[in-house]
Image: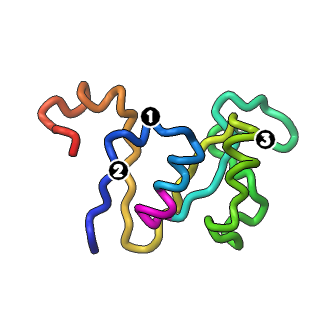
Amino acid sequence: MPKLVVPDDVNNLPMDAAFCCYRDQMRLHVYPVYGPRQSITSKCKFPGKQPRLRRWWDHSPHDVDIKHYFIDLPIHNIVMCPKTGVVLIDLDSKQLSSLFPKVKRL
């Protein structure tokens, strides 16, 4: 399986462009989730983790209304759902150098 490398500038991209980068360039299954600063309501019990789409597993990432979730309502975040054989490691880029001082970003 080919190695997927996240582009260095992805953290500088607007959320809509980052979503498209993950979906189109890296071919990952990505979906919008409530943002980490979303207030807890009856619809959102787990800010930053809870999918915005009901039955998200039935939706293609290409059917996501990017304008709605990332431009009109820019409080959302992106979640990646790995397929079989794909391992994702989520490291806070700000902490990467302190956790792995000898590792260089690709």
Q: Is residue 61 above or below residue 95?
A: below
Q: Position of residue 104 (x, y in %)?
A: 17, 38
Q: Is residue 69 above or below residue 65?
A: above
**Residue under the point 53% across and 55% down:** 20
Q: Position of residue 105 (x, y in %)?
A: 22, 40
- Left or right, residue 100 beside residue 47: left
Q: Secondary structure at mark 3?
A: loop
Q: Secondary structure at mark 1?
A: helix
- Left or right, residue 91 beside residue 100: right
In three-dimensional space, the C-alpha distance between marks 3 and 2, rounded to whole angstroms, equals 29 Å
Write down the residue under mark 1: 12
Three-letter amino acid code at the position of disc 1: Asn
Q: For mark 3, does the 10 Å Cα neighbourhood hold few (<14), some (14 to 19), or many (20 or more) residues?
A: some
Three-letter amino acid code at the position of disc 2: Val
In three-dimensional space, the C-alpha distance between marks 1 and 3, rounded to whole angstroms, equals 27 Å
**Residue under the point 56% across and 58% down:** 30
Write down the residue under mark 3: 44
Three-letter amino acid code at the position of disc 3: Cys
Q: Earlier in the sequence, mark 2 or mark 1?
A: 2
Residue that lies at the very extreme toward the left in this rendered image: 102
Quarter of the image where one finds residue 5: bottom left
Q: Earlier in the sequence, mark 3 or mark 2?
A: 2
Write down the residue under mark 2: 6
Q: Is residue 49 above or below residue 29?
A: above
Q: Nearer the viewer, residue 3 or 57?
A: 3
Q: Nearer the viewer, residue 11 or 51?
A: 11
Q: Can you tell which of label 2 and label 1 is closer to the viewer?
A: 1
**Residue under the point 68% across and 28% down:** 37
Point out the stretch of residues depicted in magenta: 22-28
Q: Position of residue 99 (x, y in %)?
A: 25, 30
**Residue under the point 76% across and 40% down:** 72
